[in-house]
Every structure is written in C-alpha cells, then in structure tokens.
C-alpha cells in the first residue's frame, strides 16, 4: 500500500518508545525506522504481510494514550507507518473512542460517571470541582460501578512500571500498572509518574481529590465479593467463588473446583460439550437470549477455518456490572470457560474484548491468562490433550457500540467500531471474516456448572438505584421481580423499575409480580436484557432520567445509519422540549417521539438504534410520564 | 456503443415480491429485483459501482418473518422469501428517514430528494427551528473541488471510492462518532496537505453534491449553473493510451465538469486528475 504521510509532525521519543515497546523496534525504514539505508532504497516492503498487523492499531493507540495521555499527529503517523494503516483511517479510529483524545490534554483524566445509577445517588460533574487544574474532567457513561455509586475513574498517563528499567525489552506499556489491589508503594521511575488508574466509588469530593493527587496511593477497592450481598449462600452457583477464592491465585481456583469442567469437556469431546450445552438449554445472557448450543454448533460445523471465539466483556449497558464482578471475583472461571468454548467450536484463538473502563478486571485477567499459560492450561497443548488454545485480551476505549456482536469484530480488527450488516452472521463470517462464536461473560461462565452437572439454571441481576443493598444477585429463573427487590431492600415509595437497562423498559410498582424468565418478561412486554434492575423512588424526576437515557444513546450512536444518527438527536431534543410539560402541552412531541422511535426500531442497522426508544416509550405508556 | 460485460451464468432464485412470483439471478439484491420488476424504491447511498453500505436506510422493505425492515440495496434475494416493498411500515420509515435527513442536512442538490419528500409526505420542518443541523461552511482549500459537508448524508461512498474499492489512496475516512461524525482527512487537514491525488472519483460517486467541482460550485453561487442548458458528450480521453471515456458537460460552449460513464467495463466511471480536471487547454482560445 503506497501510503502518503504529510510529515508535518514527528513523533516524540516518548511516543515512539511507547509504540516500539508494544510492536518491537522497527525493522526497516519502510516501517518507520529512522531513515532508509542504501539497501532499503533498492527494495520495497509492503503488501499483505505488512498490512496484516492492522489489528494492533487499537493496542498501539492505547500504548501512546497510556504513556502520553493523548494522540498527537506525530504519534498517529508513526503508528500508521509501523502498521501500514492509512493515516486518515487511523484518525477515524482514534476519534471514534471516547477515552482517546487527538488534542493535548493533561496526563490525568478523571472520568466521572453521570449515568442512571450514579445520578440517582447524586453523582455529577460538580463533585469534581475540588480537583486540581492539572486534571481533565470528563463526563462518562456508566462505569459499571453501580453498587458503589456515584463512581469515577482516574487515569494517569505515564511510563508503565513493567517497561521501566527494562528499556526496549518485552515490557508492555499497554498494560495498566495497577489492579487496584497492590498498587501502593511503587516508586515512579525516572522522575516521571507511572501509568496509574484509580477507581473511586463512592466518589466523594475528598476521595476524588485523594485519587487525583496520587492515584497510586488511592485506597484499594473493596473486594469483588463486597458486590455480592448473598455471599456465603450455598445456593449460589455462578457467584459461589466470588469473594471466596483469591482471584489472583490459580491454585486457590483449583482448590475450589476449578478446571474440573475442562477435564470433563475433554472427556466428552467437542460434540459432547455442544450436546450438553444444548440439552441444558443455555440461552445467551448478553441480552438477546440466543441458544448458545445452536450458536456453537453452527460455528463448529463451518468448513472455513480458522474458527474464532470472542468473549464479549464490553459490558457498557448503564446499570450493568455483573460481568465485572465475575471477572474481578473469579477470573479463572472465565478463562476456563473460554477454553471449553474454544474447544467446542474448534477455535485455537480466543479474544477477550474487555471494556476500557475496567482496570482491575484487566489486571486480574492478564494474571489469570499468564498463570494458566505457565501451567499448560492455555497454549500449545492444553492439559496435555493435544489441543492448542490461547487467549488475547483486547481493551476497548470507551464505546458502548463495541458490545454489539459485529462492531466488536471491527474494533478488534483495527477499524471503527461500527456494526456490520447481517447477514452474513458471525457464525459464518465473523472476526477476520472467519466463523466466530461471540459469547457474553455470564453466558460462558454458565458452561462450567452445566459441565459439572448442576441442573438448575440461574440468572445474575444487577440491582442498583434506590435499594438498601445494591449489588449482584443470583437467583433461579422464575422468581418474581418483587422477590428480587425484596432481597435488595426496596425503597419506601417506589416510583418505577428500569428492567434490562437503557435498552430495556420501565415497569410500575404494581407490576412487580412479573416472573423473571425470558418468556415471562417478554409476555409482560418487557425484557430481562442484561439483567439490570434499577429501582427508582419517588424523589427521582422521571423526565430527567429519560433525558439522560436519550443523551446516552445520542452519545453512543456510531453514526453509521440515518435513523439512529439523527433519530437519537431528535429524540433528545423532543424530551428536552417537554421536560417540564404534561398533557396536551406534551402531546405533539410525544407523537413525534413515537414516529421517530418506530423508524429507529424498524430501520436502524443494529440493536443500539433499534432499542434506543424502548425505555422512553415504556415510561410514556406504562408510567404515564408527561401525563 | 457500450460494451456489455458478460457474467458466468447464474442460477435463478425464486421469491415473492409484493405478491408476485419473481425470479432473479442468484446474488442479486432485493433492489435489483425491484428494478427489474419496474418498482421505484428510493435510494440515496446505493451506488452502482460500489458495495452497498446501506447507511441511509431509505430503501427499507418488509421481509416476512424479520423483526426489522431490510435494506433492499444490500439484502440478497433468498429462495422462498416474501418481500413487501410498499407497506405502511416501510413507507413510514422512509418518510421519517427523509425527514431526519432533510432536517439535518441540505438536500437541495440531491437528485430526486424533493420528489421523494413530496411522495412520502415528509415534513422536515416539524422538528422545530432549533433542530440540530450540520451547519458547516463549505471547505474550499484548492482550485479543483469543494467539500460542502452541510450537504453530506454520510453515505460512505466517497470513502469507499477513495479507499480499497477503487482508488486505493485512502485520503479520507469517517472521523468522530454519532451526529458529530464527519468525512475527514487525516488530522482534519486541508485537502492540499492530505494524501488526496485529485482523481475526483469521490465527486463522481457523491449522491448529494456535498463534493463538487469548484467550477460547478462557483457557478451555483453565481446563479449561472443551468443543467437544462448543458450538453453531454462522451469521448475518449486523449492523455494516455488507456482509453478512458470522458463525458464532457458543456454549458455555453464551456466545459463545466467531466464525468465518466459507470457502465464502462474498463474504468467503471473512474478517472485520474488529468481526465477529470485537465480540460482547460481545450478552452484556450
């Protein structure tokens, strides 16, 4: 590919170093080395071999962003030379993600959650008023910390501790330094602060100031087990180990029954695993409730190879944090489950696409993968069974849409995270155009109890908002919404419950007898979605909540198709107009909302646009908002 | 005479289109079938020389059994499917999409837009005077073309034509997200600082006039652009031996722009900077 570079800006040494630490030193002048030798002027390097590293674009952008805090023209150009990516396309990718900036900004960026659960608990940007001027404060969609709302995430750019003192070796600056558990006590190297992240929840002004002043010494987060109010209940299946095992220890995981399911899987063979999963009737937990066994069977039976497994850990639905708790509390379970899924569908490579806002999960999962690899539970010969499987983590950079099953492929491949048109479906043409199974974290973790012989299926629910004990609850299918909320401690005067997240719908306090099954919620005209149960009491101003939902969809629309790109804007505008109105004054705009909503639902390319009107519609029809 | 490229024979797919049994070659889209059957489905982002991006969604039709509407331009006909092109639901979506587009962008130079807005009774004004619009000033940074993104519907055709579908120059891409997404060069630089080679193939495929010849832009601004007074003459480019076809658009004995026939089997409407813009010598009198 004959790429043209404008060469108006050069990458700094720091930026080059950050990229080289990820990609290795440039081999030739053709891929960004300094100058071209006389030999190199006599041959050219390019073609498919040079282009096939495009999927490292997102990690390379992270490398520079982690080190410097933003993406300069020089840094982008250098990345493009190294990966043979057209600069205009890399710019398009860099500007797609909200955690990146192509304009200079301070090394410290504070992402303050302004989404539903945090707003219900008083979270707002004004909480960050007290932080210093050296911090860039930006509003963030749901950070997945709803049980400890309000929440904020501080990211400080700098050298990675693993790269410090090991110049030019294998250190990976794309990895954040801290897992939030053992970060304190590290000394920043070479006079520059190390890359650090601090999760602040609850985000009190004092805690924010402390975290922004010295993120490395910010108080450690509570264990993931603290998000499980039912901890210790012997009926727990998926959450049984959360808060019980040491998430950093493979030995502890094995002592608690880990890797029994993988052994069973090898005994059953791939077809046997798929049969067990199909017989168990496992439905996808990402929101769409597609039969997992059928998806695996369809992928496994494709003649085209290689097959890929993608774990969708881009949990960004406002109010959803179950996958984070699973990954932080029981990371090896996900690694084991991915290995089983990969084995079943005939894949040798799995990608774990993790949202960029989960630094602790990232650290723990990296540790889990490295430990599993060191013990032969991942790699060339898993458990000595002659099956090769490995997992690569890909970190998202702030884009809800990347949780859409085809947008995730574009994001991993180094393109803008825009959804693809279906058909063809992922099982036929997915990641890199090859047959791919995409499964959500909770779905995958469900495979372990199935192979271990547990018969009763359970579902995780994310309780947040005005309840006494917010957190993740695990219950068998079929309990009612009322029973679930009773467990979490309902407010005295409940106004409404948002079920299924921003893409879900509201239900009234007198509708709490809905059985929590996929069929039961569908029959009641609502959805389990991602398991969100956001309880709102009567102090909450409903029009404000609806506005926030509309803002969320406008911000997160990728912009590819017209109904969603413009429709979400028109929806927000109409809700703004009627935020203080009722009855006849609002009727015209409500009619407009219905028309735009119907077109978004019918004509959008993907689920984001198709569901962007669900919650608002249910608030109007079921709650009588604006009456 | 236009050469007609012959394809390998294809099997026929039989399906129901608006109650009629139709047969189309395997691989054809619903839109191909509609056109063969003489149905007029509005399309904006569909291009005859490019892979459908199905971004504009004005061509949506109802496929029986599907939860959502399907874009006719990219959904391939499948044996036994039942397609309805003119249902209440499909018409509603087309109407709203036209309203959304016309309320946010300037469709004044989009062929047929006004006609469809009338046909579907779209009322772009009903979103109110404060409805967000692109409101971009035209970008005039060179003597050959103008980028007027106020008219851009983000159909991705120029990006595809500049990228791996035709030109392989990759000077432009979509940057930003959502309503703020725009077609952009790297770092949003002026076109003159970008990788652009001024082939003008992006202008050739632009469906709305967001990309236009500077000559056309200036004449429109001066009020002298008059398509009805123009003649079109297709000839062969004399610059090199490839033999690309040029269509010269002439108004009052001046060449005002140059296009190229899309059905030419060699160039499919693509030209280089010389063929597209190098006509001034003809007018040196």
Image: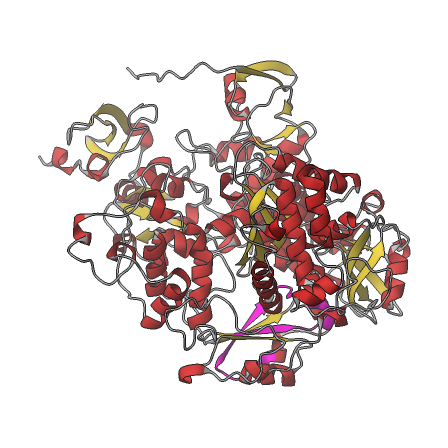
The extreme left residue here reads B285
Q: Residue at x 32, y 71 (%)?
A: A13
Taking A353 as reference, is B282 left or right? Answer: left
Vertically, is B110 above or below A504? above
Residue A148 counted in the magenta span:
yes
Q: Nearer the viewer, residue A359 or B34?
A: A359
Span highlighted in magenta in the image: A128-155
Vertically, is B214 above or below A362? above
Asked whether residue A294 appears in the rendered view, the answer is: yes
Q: Nearer the viewer, residue A230 or A9?
A: A230
Q: Identify the colour scheme used.
A: secondary structure
Q: Residue at x 44, y 42 (%)?
A: B156
Quadrant of residue A345 in the image?
top right
Residue B5 counted in the magenta span:
no
Vertically, is A370 above or below A49? below
Q: Nearer the viewer, residue A513 or A453?
A: A453
Q: Residue at x 45, y 67 (%)?
A: A65
Q: Position of residue B271 (x, y in %)?
A: 26, 34
């Amino acid at each position: 590919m004959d790429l043209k570079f404008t060469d108006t800006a050069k990458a700094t040494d720091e930026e080059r170093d950050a990229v080289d630490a990820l990609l290795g030193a440039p081999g030739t002048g053709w891929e960004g080395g300094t100058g071209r030798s006389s030999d190199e002027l006599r041959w050219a390097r390019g073609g498919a071999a040079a282009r096939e590293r495009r999927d490292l674009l997102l990690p390379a952008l992270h490398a520079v962003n982690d080190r410097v805090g933003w993406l300069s023209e020089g840094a982008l150009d250098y990345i493009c030379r190294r990966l043979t990516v057209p600069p205009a396309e890399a710019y398009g990718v860099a500007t797609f993600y909200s955690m990146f900036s192509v304009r200079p900004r301070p090394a410290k960026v504070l992402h303050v959650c302004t989404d539903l659960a945090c707003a219900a608990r008083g979270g707002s940007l004004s909480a960050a008023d007290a932080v210093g001027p050296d911090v860039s404060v930006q509003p963030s969609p749901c950070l997945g910390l709803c049980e400890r709302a309000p929440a904020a995430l501080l990211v400080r750019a700098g050298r990675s501790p693993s790269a410090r003192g090991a110049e030019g070796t294998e250190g990976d600056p794309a990895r954040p330094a801290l897992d939030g558990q053992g970060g304190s006590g590290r000394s920043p190297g070479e006079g520059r602060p190390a890359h650090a992240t601090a999760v602040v929840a609850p985000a009190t002004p004092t805690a924010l100031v402390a975290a922004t002043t010295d993120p490395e010494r910010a108080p450690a987060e509570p264990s993931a087990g603290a998000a499980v109010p039912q901890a210790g209940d012997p009926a727990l299946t998926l959450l049984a180990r959360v808060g019980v095992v040491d998430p950093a220890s493979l030995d502890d995981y094995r002592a608690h029954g880990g890797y029994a399911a993988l052994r069973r899987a090898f005994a059953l063979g791939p077809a046997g695993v798929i049969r067990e999963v199909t017989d168990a009737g496992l439905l996808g937990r990402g929101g769409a409730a597609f039969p997992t066994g059928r998806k695996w069977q369809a992928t496994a039976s494709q003649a085209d190879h290689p097959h890929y497994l993608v774990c969708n850990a881009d949990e960004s639905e406002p109010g959803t944090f179950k996958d984070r708790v699973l990954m932080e509390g029981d990371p090896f379970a996900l690694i084991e489950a991915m290995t089983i899924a990969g084995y079943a569908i005939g894949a040798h490579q799995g990608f774990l696409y993790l949202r960029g806002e989960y630094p602790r999960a990232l650290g723990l999962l990296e540790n889990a993968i490295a430990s599993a690899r060191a013990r032969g539970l991942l790699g060339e010969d898993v458990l000595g069974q002659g099956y090769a499987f490995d997992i690569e983590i890909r970190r998202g950079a702030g884009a809800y849409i990347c949780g859409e099953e085809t947008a995730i492929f574009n994001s991993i491949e180094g393109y803008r995270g825009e959804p693809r048109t279906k058909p063809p479906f992922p099982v036929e043409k997915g990641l890199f155009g090859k047959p791919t199974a995409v499964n959500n974290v909770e779905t995958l973790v469900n495979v372990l109890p199935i192979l271990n012989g547990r018969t009763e299926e359970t579902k995780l629910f994310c309780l947040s908002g005005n309840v006494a004990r917010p957190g993740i609850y695990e219950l068998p299918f079929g309990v009612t919404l009322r029973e679930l909320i009773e467990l979490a401690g309902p407010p005295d005067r409940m106004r409404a419950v948002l079920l299924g997240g921003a893409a879900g719908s509201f239900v009234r306090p007198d509708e709490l007898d809905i059985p929590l099954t996929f069929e039961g919620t569908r029959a009641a005209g609502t959805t389990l979605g991602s398991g969100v149960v956001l309880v709102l009491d009567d102090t909450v101003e409903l029009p404000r909540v609806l506005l926030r939902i509309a803002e969320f969809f406008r911000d997160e629309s990728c912009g590819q198709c017209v109904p969603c790109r413009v429709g979400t804007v028109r929806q927000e505008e109409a809700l703004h107009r009627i935020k203080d109105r009722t009855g006849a004054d609002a009727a015209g705009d409500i009619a407009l909302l219905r028309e735009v909503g119907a077109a978004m639902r019918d004509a959008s390319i993907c689920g984001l646009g198709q569901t962007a009107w669900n919650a608002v519609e249910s608030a109007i029809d079921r709650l009588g908002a604006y009456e | 005479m236009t050469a007609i490229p012959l394809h390998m024979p294809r099997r026929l797919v039989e399906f129901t289109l608006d109650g009629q049994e139709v047969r189309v070659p395997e691989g054809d889209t619903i839109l191909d079938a509609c056109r063969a059957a003489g149905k007029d489905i509005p399309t904006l982002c569909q291009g005859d020389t490019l892979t459908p991006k199905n971004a504009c969604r004005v061509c949506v039709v109802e496929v029986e059994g599907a939860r959502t509407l399907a874009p006719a331009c990219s959904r391939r006909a499948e044996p036994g499917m039942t397609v309805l092109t003119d249902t209440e639901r499909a018409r509603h979506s087309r109407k709203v999409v036209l309203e959304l587009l016309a309320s946010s962008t300037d469709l004044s130079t989009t062929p047929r837009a006004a006609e469809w807005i009338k046909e579907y009774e779209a009322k772009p004004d009903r979103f109110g005077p404060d409805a967000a619009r692109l409101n971009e000033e035209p970008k005039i940074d060179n003597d050959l073309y103008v980028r007027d993104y106020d008219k851009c519907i983000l159909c991705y055709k120029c990006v595809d034509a500049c990228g791996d579908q035709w030109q392989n120059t990759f000077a432009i891409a979509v940057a930003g997200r959502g309503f703020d997404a725009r077609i952009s060069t790297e770092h949003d630089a002026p076109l003159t600082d970008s990788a652009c080679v001024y082939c003008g193939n992006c202008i050739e495929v632009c469906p709305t006039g967001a990309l236009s010849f500077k000559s056309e832009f200036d004449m429109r601004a001066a009020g002298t652009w008059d398509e009805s007074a123009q003649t079109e003459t297709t000839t062969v480019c004399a610059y090199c031996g490839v033999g690309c076809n040029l269509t010269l658009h002439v108004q009052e004995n001046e060449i005002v722009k140059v296009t190229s026939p899309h059905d030419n089997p060699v160039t499919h409407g693509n030209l280089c900077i010389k063929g597209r813009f190098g006509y001034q010598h003809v007018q040196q009198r």
